[in-house]
Image (tube, grey):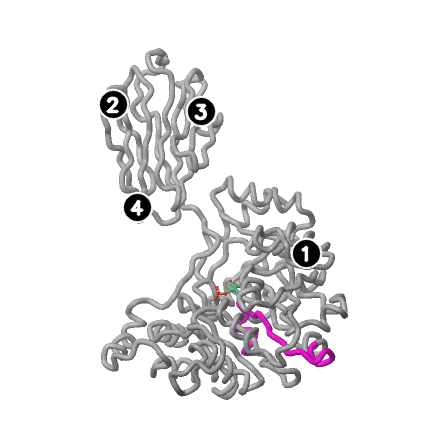
Amino acid sequence: MHLASLMEVNAHGEHESISNDNKRGVIHSAARSAIPSVAWNMTDGFDGCFVEVVRVRHPSESWQCGNGRAYTRTLPHPLRHPPRYGRSFIASAIGREDKAAGSLHGGAPGNPDPSCPSPEGVGALVVPTLVPVFRPLLPSAQEILPYLERIDQTRWYTNFGPLLDEFEQRLATHFDVDASCIATAANGTLALMASVATATPARGQDVPIPAWTFPATALAVLGTGLRPYLCDIEEESWVIDVANIPPAVIRRSRALMPVAPFGAVPRFDSWMACAEHSGIPLIVDAAASFDQLASVGVPFGAPTMVMVSLHATKALGVGEGAVVVSNDPAWIERFRQYINFGFSGTRRSDAPGINAKLSEYAAAVGLAALDGWAQARRQWVQTTAVFAKGLRALELRAQPGFGNGEISPYCVAEFASREICDRAIAVLAADGIESRRWWGLGLHTNPSLSDLPRGHLTRTDDISGRTIGLPFWRDIGSETTERVFTALLKAV
Ligand SMILES: Cc1ncc(COP(=O)(O)O)c(C=O)c1O
């Protein structure tokens, strides 16, 4: 937390600095006869903390937050109530990265509280750390450096260079497949788009997807000019309910596109059976299943493409990137052609395409991330065990598969009702703890996707409303974990 400046403006319009040791600062002085303003500006490296401005307030004063976007509250606070000031209040303002500047101002100038002996020390700036919902941790500059130096030597920056080649080889080892069954791409959304665009046979205009997923699943389909069809999810597994996709939709589908939610093990058995039975290929959005896919592999059967995102929020991140794994090397070939302008060995665009190649720089990060994977994985496993235990103690369920051995970068808690879930969000927020409905309330609630054709989405509506992503990352630490569970306990 860097607090660039925190100023108090006294009655004469003078600014007085307020000391700040990045944890707790005391308002040193304030004009006795007027109610000052408190202004803050945290644009300099403000990194996800919140600031709480605590002031003893005369009952006749009124305070306003000058930053319309900041969250403010003014409330009596018996615990921190300094007795000598009679009735007192706390005004607090929470600023986030995008809300990093603001001010509190107001009061009743000329109407000071005569019982107030001295304003000195009446206020305190408290800067507890905001608990974000996720803190990505990618390899350090030092760990990436040897790979960057190789780029300096080769002067090969992108276009299937030696680092990318090595990265793909090592990914093939991780997923235990031949290198011809693997390709990388600039990000998961483009990798899904390339998978849909190169799926054969190229007949049918619909692509059934679950309604409960990240918008990228639908946007990738739309990007190819095809039409996502939103399906409901299963109660227990949270995956697409293939049994209830209308046969007419299947008949006009280009591919079936299920999602492995929040790092679940892909449910190849039922998806493959549906794809084979319908004669369509299978594209699995397994964005967060880097670990899980390695343990199950891609089975033989219908032509299948599985996408794993390498976004910074995933278990193995490179910043932006993705890897696809297939049981069909010919599909991988078409995929590679698509992500490189439709080129195939020449500079002639022979087939539809875009530019979605992964650069040597991203490969450098990926190689360094793979160097540290075993250790990172151990840390994920430990953290997962702690969260799984904490949730069990509160009789809460996490996403299917959480704590079953493989690791996911998410911990999504399921509550008994939407009401309890909303309460949990509010209680966490009041304690400075962020939570997130990672996938909102279903794709159909996104304005740009609300017109998509769909079936009944009863379970999507229900489950998306009762679940939230808790703060969760591999080195979250016991103190933050305890804060999260202490807050959760109040809600359930
Ligand atoms: C289910 C799902 N699909 C697709 C994506 C898109 O991946 P990317 O961010 O690499 O484009 C995400 C991203 O989190 C995701 O969660």
**The residue carrying mark 3 has its beta carbon less than 8 Å from ligand 1:** no
Secondary structure beneath dot 1 equals helix
| Earlier-in-chain disc, 3 versus 4 | 4
Q: Amino acid at mark 1?
A: Thr
Secondary structure beneath dot 2 equals loop
Residue found at x 66% / y 53%: 395
Callout 1–callout 3 Cβ contact below 8 Å: no
Residue identified by numbered label 3 = 89
Give the mark count.
4
| Earlier-in-chain disc, 1 versus 4 | 4
The CA span between labels 2 and 4 is: 25 Å
Q: Where does the magenta region start and end?
A: 275-294
Residue identified by numbered label 2 = 13
Say the numbered circle drawn on residue 460.
1
Q: Position of residue 173 (x, y in %)?
A: 47, 84
Residue 295 is drawn in which quadrant? bottom right
The CA span between labels 1 and 3 is: 43 Å
